[in-house]
């Protein structure tokens, strides 16, 4: 009994001197033993990649056409072209010499008509003529007859309808080529005049060749119509020199130039432009000319004559406008 008590005493003293046990953390209890925790490399491969590694579509994919190139898209306001000044030009004021349409002057007629020819032809004069006698409301509109005769029939019909008789300056080579048309001009009551033979610049040729040009045209016109071309002569291109004027005068011709013209030789012309140009050169006693071969000449002449007849003008041949008394050759229509 004594031994048992001593043993118990010794065991209790040993227990009192030993260190106290430290409780384990609460989290340690929730964790599985280290041997059972899967390693990081052992994560299942079926798990999707993190969202940060998924490609994000671009807001403007390069494969999609730009907005301006997509036909189905409605263009924005900036895509509408702004009109420029050249696309919408400011209208220019109408000239006071502008010609009205044909129908607006179709009924116009002169208060007078020229008496039928032949008209007395004056003798040749030196120098050159730019203007007639200046008789009130009398104008000469002559024609250089050359080139294609295609517009000629309509032109002659217009002159007939408007009661106009005038002077035709005949190119000699044209007369040889179209003799029937020369006869028709005379049959319609027009006066014959000389435009040389070959339409060359007479300033560049000697006097004997100038004379040959004039005489050759005179011969062919006389043979076809019985009319002389003297004394009226208009040089081709209007080109003249002292030699041209002197040679023509010595042979019986007066050189006729002009106060105004249709300027139908311009490439950018039209019936509107030609008619207005002629009106700008028109006044009592004016001498004007145009060519018979321009395709728009019939319309031009119809409108021009209508405009001037509506203003009381009468058209007369060269022999009338250069007479001492042009009015003596006028009569009621």
Image: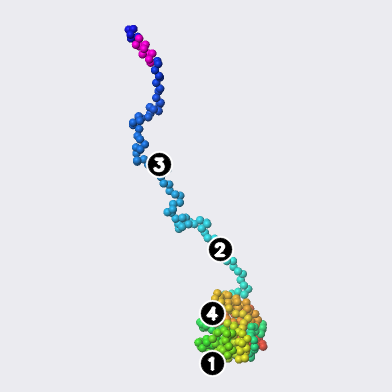
* Residue 138 vs residue 201, the one in the foreground: 201
Residue 223's tag is 1
Give the mark nearest the N terminus, 3 or 1.
Answer: 3
Q: What stretch is highlighted in magenta?
A: 6-15
Q: Where is residue 139 in the image (x, y as percent from the top left)?
A: 63, 82
Residue position marked by numbered label 4 in the rendering: 294
> What is the distance, in whole Å, between disc 1 and disc 2 at their CAs?
63 Å
Q: Where, quadrant-wise, is the C terminus in this rendering?
A: bottom right
Category of crowding for the residue at label 1, using alpha-carbon neighbours closer than 10 angstroms: few (below 14), some (14–19), many (at least 20): few
Residue position marked by numbered label 2 in the rendering: 84
Q: Which of marks 3 and 1 is in front?
A: 3
Quadrant of the rendered image containing residue 331: bottom right
Residue position marked by numbered label 3 in the rendering: 50
Q: Nearer the viewer, mark 2 or mark 3?
A: 3
Q: Nearer the viewer, mark 1 or mark 2?
A: 2
* Residue 163 vs residue 212, the one in the foreground: 212
Q: Which residue is depicted at the point 61% across and 87% down?
A: 243
Q: In the rendered structure, does residue 312 fall within the stretch colored magenta?
A: no
The local secondary structure at tag 4 comes to loop
Q: Nearer the viewer, mark 4 or mark 2?
A: 2
133 versus 79 height, above or below: below
Quadrant of the rendered image containing residue 112: bottom right
Give the mark nearest the N terminus, 4 or 2.
Answer: 2
Predominant secondary structure in magenta?
Answer: helix
> What is the distance, in whole Å, between disc 3 and disc 4 at their CAs?
88 Å
Q: In the rendered structure, does residue 12 fall within the stretch colored magenta?
A: yes
């Amino acid at each position: 009994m004594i031994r048992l008590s001593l043993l118990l005493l010794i065991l209790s003293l040993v227990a009192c001197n030993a260190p106290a046990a430290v409780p384990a953390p609460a989290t340690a209890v929730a964790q599985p033993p280290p041997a059972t925790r899967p390693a990081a490399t052992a994560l299942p491969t079926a798990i999707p990649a993190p969202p940060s590694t998924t490609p994000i579509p671009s807001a403007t994919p390069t494969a999609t056409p730009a907005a301006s190139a997509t036909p189905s898209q409605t263009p924005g306001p900036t895509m509408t072209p702004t009109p420029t000044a050249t696309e919408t030009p400011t209208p220019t004021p109408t000239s006071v010499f502008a010609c009205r349409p044909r129908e607006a002057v179709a009924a116009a007629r002169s208060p007078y008509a020229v008496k039928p020819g032949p008209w007395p032809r004056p003798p040749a004069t030196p120098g050159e003529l730019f203007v007639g006698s200046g008789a009130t409301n009398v104008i000469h509109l002559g024609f250089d007859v050359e080139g294609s005769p295609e517009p000629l029939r309509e032109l002659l019909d217009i002159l007939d309808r408007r009661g106009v008789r005038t002077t035709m300056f005949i190119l000699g080579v044209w007369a040889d080529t179209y003799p029937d048309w020369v006869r028709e001009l005379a049959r319609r009551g027009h006066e014959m005049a000389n435009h040389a033979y070959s339409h060359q610049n007479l300033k560049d040729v000697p006097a004997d060749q100038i004379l040959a040009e004039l005489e050759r045209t005179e011969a062919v016109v006389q043979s076809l119509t019985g009319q002389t071309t003297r004394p009226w002569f208009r040089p081709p291109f209007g080109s003249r020199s002292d030699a041209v004027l002197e040679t023509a005068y010595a042979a019986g011709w007066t050189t006729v130039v002009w106060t105004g013209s249709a300027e139908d030789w311009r490439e950018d012309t039209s019936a509107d432009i030609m008619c207005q140009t002629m009106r700008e050169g028109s006044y009592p006693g004016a001498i004007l000319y145009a060519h018979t071969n321009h395709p728009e000449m019939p319309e031009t002449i119809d409108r021009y004559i209508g405009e001037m007849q509506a203003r009381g003008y009468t058209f007369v041949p060269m022999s009338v406008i250069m007479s001492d008394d042009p009015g003596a050759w006028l009569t009621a229509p």
